[in-house]
Amino acid sequence: MKGVTLDHQERAIVYDILNEVSRKENCDVLDLPPLSDSIDPEALDTLATENTVEIQFEYLSYTISIENGMVTVSQ
């Protein structure tokens, strides 16, 4: 499984996720289904700021992992 790791720097982590998935899908972010179909984006942003929390969920055909503020998108 090949993944990409992104830094979370003063942005909502959901933007990092959507931007990376749209890059992998070769489409505009607005063409993706809502992230809220998979997870609560506000709760995700809140939890992702905790350095001790590890989060993993599925979005489209990707596994999204967040650990220590780093996002990994893999397929």
Image (tube, grey):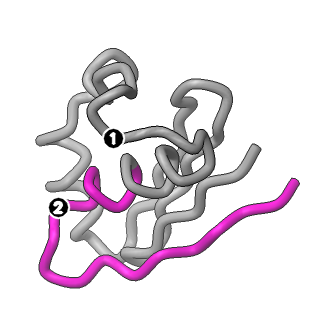
Judge the density around disc 1: few (<14), some (14-19), many (≥20) Cα neighbours within 10 Å.
some
Rendered view: 52 above or below 28: below
Check if residue 34 falls in the magenta segment: no
Vertical placement of 60 versus 70: above or below? above
Q: Which residue is mark 1?
A: 29
Sequence-wise, which precedes: disc 2 or disc 1? Answer: 2
- Quadrant assignment for the N terminus: bottom right
The image shows residue 54 at horizontal and vertical percentages of 48, 59
| Numbered label attached to residue 12 | 2
Farthest top residue?
A: 37
- Provide the residue span drawn in magenta: 1-17
Give 75 or 27, whichever is nearer the viewer.
27
Q: Is residue 3 left or right of residue 2?
A: left
Based on the displayed image, in which of its 4 quarters is residue 3 positioned?
bottom right
**Looking at the image, which is closer to me, 70 or 62?**
62
Q: Which corner quadrant of the image does residue 35 belong to?
A: top left
**Is 37 located above or below residue 6 in the figure?**
above
Left or right: where 67 falls relative to 16: right
Name the element at disc 2: loop
Which residue is at a point 76% across and 43% down the rendered structure image? 75
The structure residue drawn at horizontal position 60% and vertical position 55%, both measured from the top left corner, is 73
Task: State the residue in front, 53 or 70.
Answer: 70
Residue pictured at 47% horizontal, 61% vertical: 66
Identify the amino acid type marked 1: Val
**Callout 1 secondary element:** helix
Q: Nearer the viewer, mark 2 or mark 1?
A: 1
Three-letter amino acid code at disc 2? Ala
